Image (spheres, rainbow, N blue to C red):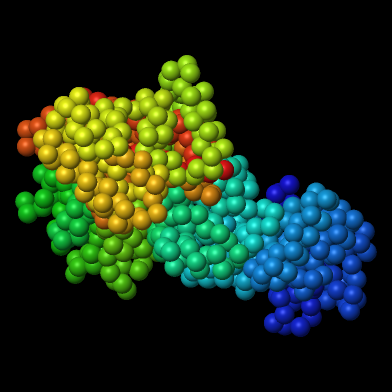
Amino acid sequence: MLEFVFNPKSVAIIGASDKPGKIGFILVNNLLKEGYKGKIYPINPKHETLLGLKCYPSVKEVKEEIDLAVIAIPAKFVPGVVKECGEAGVKAVVVISAGFKEVGHEGAKLEKELVEVAKSYGIKLVGPNCLGVINTALHLNATFAEKIPPPGRVSFFSQSGALGVALIDWSIENNFGFGKFVSLGNKADLNETDFLEYFGEDPDTDIILGYIEDVKDGRRFLEVAQKVARKKPVIIIKSGSTEAGARAASSHTGALAGSDRAFTAAFKKAGIIRAYGIKELFELAEIFKSGKLPQGNRLLVVTNAGGPGIIAADAADKLGIKLDPMSRESIEALVKKLPPSASLYNPVDVIGDATSERYKVVLEQAIKDEIVQGICVILTPQAMTDVENVAKVIIETNERTDKPIFASFIGGEGVKGGVKLLKEKSIPCYEDPLIAITAYRKLIDFKFFKERPVEKIEDIEIPPDAKERVKVILETLQDAGVRAVGEENSAKILQCYGFTFPRKKLARTPDEAVKIAEEIGYPVVLKISSPQILHKTDVGGVKLGLRTPEEVKRAFEEITLNAKRFVPDAYIKGVVVCEMITEGKELILGVSYDNTFGHMVMFGLGGIYVEVFKDVSFRIVPVSRSEAIEMIDEIKGKSLLEGVRGEKPYDKEDIIDKILRLSQLVKDFPIIKEIDINPYIVKHQGGVALDARIIINY
């Protein structure tokens, strides 16, 4: 049905006008001006003709079929007009009109009515409160933007109409081609996932770009994106990444933004490339326009200036791109043809007085060299540099190789002609080598993601009665109205799913605490036990490394006194005496819940500083084994787990196992909204959870 949105054989403009400056005038004029070859039906009861076209009082008066109706009338009349469209057999409508849920409660009611009418007639609805749609191949400009972009094979969906207008203007200025464009508006019916799916199947779209503020159905979005991003690069700006930005998103088109960390995790899971600004969006799109993918992550940099070459090398090293030297045969060939002062390794520096001939020598050798998997050509406009001829050499070389070639021509007026030649042939060219290398990394990532086998997520093996035991615990807590689950029950739930906790026992008096400590064996830990106190350290409710009966008695008294002082109304069950774990690294494992994408598993360095350093990673449930490995590799402190200063590495397999078990637990029991295991002590072999809390929803 979306074919009728982008490839209509006929378009009705409801609210057409003969007054320049009115949206109804612009919409009709845009269709005529761009040379849309389909039939155009202006709809306005006040006119018989409009801009040389027959004008109709209603869509019901048009006797021919109408594929698409574009509506630009006051909001209160829109549901009635859409009903007329349904009765006339219109396939799809684009509602330009504003005044719906973005303006408040009454607008939301009107929007709900609009959707109900459209659905009752099987009409696909774009908007309301949107800019419209464009298909450059069809010369269709069903928007109120003044011009359309040059034709291309990049398609774009945008939740912001105003941003869409700006991007169209930018694309014209920079000769950046688009195939299709759609403004989502309020997404009352069709949304980002519908257009992502359509563009994924569209034979005229090679690259998909998007701007979103929220996602309507996170699970469906993920499902579709994971399929599409394996076929075509999907590059999206997600705004509202800060608290202030999220508030702004909520007030713009009535969107309720999900948390930014959930979007980051979702994009990683789906293989979506995230851009953080408009310029970056197009810079990343440029690298994909040639359609070539590298066979690996080895890159050759060719430059006529040392400084930019070093910038490129530094960027490549930080991003894991290998600048291996060319083969011995290549270097020997270059020695014969380049001056002695040239650097022949990588970057290859053809030095400042290089003409296009030196670039040609290196590029000819590079495309034959099996070590080279991609080529970056850097140029600065020095006195001897024949910029346009260098561009022609790059173009000629590019036509004879499957290896991706991209450039960084640094300068202004001096390089303009060369940049123009390269972009006309869809060869990416950047003004900064750092940007060029960063974009190329995304090309490598896309190649790896595209070819990575789809990983089947197996259920974790747990004892036969484990699920039933957890079910009973949770139902008992629900019946009691408990939402914040204390350490004792949290531990019982996690133990059912394979977590280990230290030996421990509840003491109600100092003497009982001493007796338990002697049974367990010193040293011990004492922790306050209260359903009202979840963060025990914050209230002085934990004492570590107690080695004598006197220390245990004193700690018991201090802990209970602290608890009563900080939380006077708390019910104190007693003090838990625990085995002291004296070796291992402190981690944090947990689960949080996002309203858009559901449960996310968290992993990071733990202890009391986790909220300060925030060295954590997230993945959307269900988490696969490869995702669990990625989570560990992403944190800055991962080297601490590999063993430093001669110590043995810590048990990475145990961490992977526990991440997968948390994923399984919340998949089995969605009622669990949060889990916090902090710290989790990973040892050289195995690990143990020292403290845990769970939040349930009911």
Quarter of image, res 491: top left
- Identify which residue is drawn at 22% across, 46% down: 557
Q: Is residue 313 visible?
A: yes
Q: Is residue 676 left or right of residue 457?
A: left
Which quadrant: the C terminus? top right
Q: Is residue 250 left or right of residue 563?
A: right
- Identify which residue is drawn at 34% across, 28% down: 499
Looking at the picture, tell me which residue is in the foreground, 167 or 579.
579
- Identify which residue is drawn at 36% across, 63% down: 419
- Give the x, y percent position of residue 414: 29, 71
Q: Is residue 266 above or below residue 305?
A: above
Quarter of image, res 573: top left
Q: Is residue 175 visible?
A: no
- Give the x, y percent position of residue 13: 79, 67
Quarter of image, res 403: top left
Tally the numbered discs: 0
Looking at the picture, tell me which residue is in the foreground, 555 or 316.
555
Q: Is residue 380 left or right of residue 254?
A: left
Looking at the picture, tell me which residue is in the foreground, 551 or 58.
551
- Give the x, y percent position of residue 434: 27, 58
- Give the x, y percent position of residue 366: 25, 42
Q: Is residue 656 left or right of residue 292?
A: left
Q: Is residue 300 above or below residue 352?
A: above
Name the residue furthest top: 464
- Identify which residue is drawn at 22% across, 43% down: 556
